[in-house]
Image (cartoon, rainbow, N blue to C red):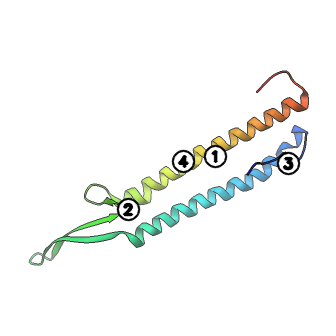
Amino acid sequence: MEFRYPFNNPSDWYEHHAYILTDLLKGYIRDVEFQIKSSIDNFEKNKEDIVLNEYPEYGCADILTFHQGIENQTWNLNAIFKEKFPSMQRSSSLISLFGFLENELDKLCNLIQSSTESSIEF
């Protein structure tokens, strides 16, 4: 979706554009957090345990737990699905947000340039 500037005056940028974008960014952040919570819930509900060996005389067993092709003999599944993956998703989202904001600031610079008829290019 392309945002259009319904104005030609850069001094109106915050009131008519940036202020609205703030709501969109907040919504995006809420959605990312919802996705993270859903992924953690999915891990909790759908991780699978397989009994490899049973030792009834000792009252224990070797159990392999896995989720999405990742198993607990090599990895700490709680750390991966509850900490690492959410952290990676938040980091990716932050990078995307900065790219989005940079693009919006470029548009503002172009608006300033065209409204002032400046020969300076941004």
> Residue 96: horizontal and vertical position, in percent?
61, 45
Residue 72: give its label: none
Asked if marks 1 and 3 touch (Cβ < 8 Å), the reply is no
Q: Amino acid at mark 1?
A: Leu
Q: CA distance from mark 1 to mark 3?
A: 20 Å
Q: Secondary structure at mark 1?
A: helix
Q: Which residue is mark 3?
A: 15
Q: CA distance from mark 4 to mark 3?
A: 28 Å
Asked if marks 3 and 2 touch (Cβ < 8 Å), the reply is no
Mark 3 burial class by Cα count in 10 Å: few <14, some 14-19, many 20+? few
Residue 51, quarter of picture: bottom left
Q: CA distance from mark 3 to mark 2?
A: 46 Å
Q: Which residue is mark 4?
A: 92
In this view, the residue in front, 89 or 5, is 5
Please report whichever mark, 4 or 2, sits nearer to the chain's N-terminal start.
Answer: 2
Q: Which residue is mark 2?
A: 68
Q: Is residue 43 above or below residue 91?
A: below
> Residue 45: horizontal and vertical position, in percent?
41, 73
- Horizontal relation, residue 25 to residue 92: left or right: right
